[in-house]
Image (cartoon, helix red, strand yellow):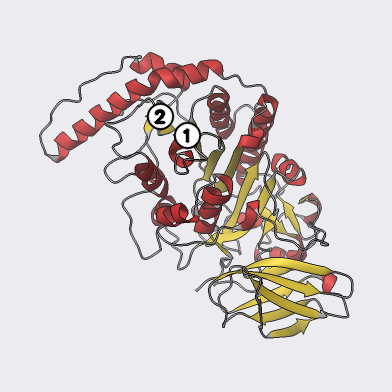
């Protein structure tokens, strides 16, 4: 019953001017593209981003699947954090300054149901809220009223949203239907549906079956109308890099790169890979660095690396940014089946050809301060969405607030607030961040002499007084109970230098 199916990969692309046209002054100049990479099933973040500063606790929690320290991939500018040994491609992107690791991403009162958790990520809903539209669907509907009847148009001849798969993502649901068309492969798409521009959807009975038939017919209309544009872009585009074989994610990203290079005016692409629900046999029985999870991480890492290399060879990598996400993380402790069960927070990777300013957002999750057996949240996923909308795609705060239904302070992947005399690669840890009641400040740079001063400044430059208590040689606790929700700069002075970091306070 699916009207247009071409190829088997789950790559979803969301309309080009969907984000650009919101700012009339930017619409003709901002040609940035966003790629979303879904790791379907709930990725084990603790074996993906490994806390080298807590290896004893890490090994105790998951002795049967823990990655040996000498196999962990090292990252530049840090001795506390590493990557799974299969992730050489993403290690290279990080070391080149083209990737940010956002620690412990989740949302308050999280769900550990695949279906409900996915729905929350797709719709940007609160955990106690059910929405019938996706966050991108709401955006597209506000920017392109009258879809699908008024499209394609002279101003926007390309699809508002394209998904290379059999079904469209909940993220793309508008108020009445999906804002996307579903295809499988750009070449066979035009052959399958033809380049004819009119199929009369006809009139059907106002019954469940009749409405379903009308929807399918309308999808056929949209698919045929856009076939020519997709075919032309696929014909003009040419992949220049070598992609790994037997890698379904790389196959999807190869299509995305080709369409971008071919000039398709599509703004956001969505690709996915499944298999991350690793309750058992997550690793090999004798070598924890290989196995099912390692294979998945290698496909993700190699695929993204090849994609970004391809874009660079095309000369368009600076236009493209992307993020990985999964519906939830997994528990800190492993189970007896060499697997991990459903958990809460997990890392998100944000990559870009240029523009990454903060390589670590947050800090390694504490393995001695868990929520049951789960890693606690540091960053709300909607803060990542907000950053992608505003800091990457150039949207206003008002637009982001409308899409996300309330204000979420953007996660600072594309921002860096430092003092003029500060080394931007050296800072100190703040945990949790965002904070509610109190926050810990940690750094080896504090030294035996401790801190000489601590100052908190709001975004107007006004200094604020907050209680600070020294817990250990390199650790301080700061109360933020009296601070209003918002963004602050925390500046500390040691005997050796001045350091600053960004703090988000949520209520």
Residue 307: percent from left, percent from top: 63, 32
Residue at 68% of width from left, 41% of height from top? Answer: 354
Quarter of the image where one finds residue 450: bottom right
| Image disc number at residue 471 | none
Residue 486: percent from left, percent from top: 55, 69
Quarter of the image where one finds residue 210: top left
Left or right, 286 with respect to 253, comes to right
Residue at 71% of width from left, 39% of height from top? Answer: 89
Q: Secondary structure at mark 2?
A: loop
1 or 2: tag closer to the N-terminus: 1
**From this viewpoint, which residue is outermost toward the left?**
205
Whether the residues at callouts 1 and 2 have beta carbons within 8 Å, the answer is yes
Q: Secondary structure at mark 1?
A: loop
Residue 88: percent from left, percent from top: 73, 41
Inter-mark Cα distance, 1 to 2: 9 Å
Depth order, front residue of 344/423: 423
| Image disc number at residue 16 | 1
Residue at 89% of width from left, 75% of height from top? Answer: 495
Observer able to see residue 279: no
Above or below residue 312? Residue 232 is: above
Residue 309: percent from left, percent from top: 69, 31
Depth order, front residue of 181/260: 260
Quarter of the image where one finds residue 79: bottom right
Mark toward the viewer: 1 or 2: 2
Above or below residue 337? Residue 333 is: below
| Image disc number at residue 156 | 2
């Amino acid at each position: 019953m699916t009207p247009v199916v071409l190829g088997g990969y789950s790559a979803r692309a969301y309309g080009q001017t969907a984000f650009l046209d919101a700012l009339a002054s930017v619409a003709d100049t901002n040609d940035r593209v966003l790629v979303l990479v879904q790791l379907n099933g709930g990725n084990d973040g603790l074996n993906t981003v490994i806390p080298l500063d807590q290896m004893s606790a890490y090994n105790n929690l998951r002795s049967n699947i823990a990655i040996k320290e000498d196999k962990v991939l090292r990252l530049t500018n840090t001795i506390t954090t590493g990557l799974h040994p299969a992730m050489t491609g993403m290690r290279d992107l990080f070391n080149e300054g083209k990737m940010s690791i956002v620690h412990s991403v989740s949302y308050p009162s999280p769900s550990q149901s695949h279906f409900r958790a996915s729905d929350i990520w797709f719709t940007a809903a609160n955990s106690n809220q059910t929405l019938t539209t996706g966050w991108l669907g709401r955006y597209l509907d506000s920017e392109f009223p009258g879809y699908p009847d008024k499209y394609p148009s002279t101003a926007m001849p390309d699809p508002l949203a394209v998904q290379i798969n059999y079904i469209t993502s909940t993220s793309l649901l508008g108020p009445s239907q999906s804002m996307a068309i579903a295809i499988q492969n750009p070449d066979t798409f035009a052959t399958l549906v033809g380049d004819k521009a009119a199929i009369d959807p006809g009139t059907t009975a106002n019954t469940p079956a009749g409405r379903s038939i009308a929807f399918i017919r309308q999808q056929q209309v949209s698919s045929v109308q856009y076939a020519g544009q997709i075919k032309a872009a696929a014909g003009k585009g040419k992949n220049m890099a070598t992609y790994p074989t037997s890698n379904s994610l790389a196959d999807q990203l190869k299509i995305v790169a080709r369409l971008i290079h071919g000039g398709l005016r599509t703004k956001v692409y969505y690709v996915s890979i499944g298999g991350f629900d690793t309750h058992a046999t997550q690793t090999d029985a004798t070598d924890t660095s290989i196995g099912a999870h390692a294979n998945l991480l290698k496909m993700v890492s190699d695929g993204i690396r090849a994609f970004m290399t391809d874009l660079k060879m095309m000369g368009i990598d600076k236009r493209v940014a992307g993020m990985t996400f999964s519906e939830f993380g997994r528990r800190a402790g492993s189970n007896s089946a060499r697997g991990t069960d459903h958990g809460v927070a997990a890392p998100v990777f944000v990559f870009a050809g240029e523009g990454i300013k903060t390589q670590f957002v947050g800090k390694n999750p504490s393995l001695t301060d868990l929520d049951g057996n789960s890693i606690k949240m540091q960053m709300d996923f909607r803060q990542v969405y907000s950053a992608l909308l505003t800091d990457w795609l150039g949207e206003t705060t008002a637009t982001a607030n409308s899409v996300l239904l309330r204000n979420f302070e953007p996660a600072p992947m594309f921002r860096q607030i430092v003092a003029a005399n500060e080394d931007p690669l050296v800072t100190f840890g703040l945990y949790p961040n965002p904070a509610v009641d109190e926050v810990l400040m940690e750094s080896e740079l504090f030294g035996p002499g401790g801190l000489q001063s601590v100052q908190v400044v709001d975004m107007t430059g006004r200094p604020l007084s907050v209680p600070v208590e020294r817990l250990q040689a390199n650790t301080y606790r700061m109360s933020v109970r009296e601070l209003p929700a918002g963004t602050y700069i925390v500046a500390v002075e040691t005997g050796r230098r001045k350091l600053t970091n960004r703090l988000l306070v949520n209520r």
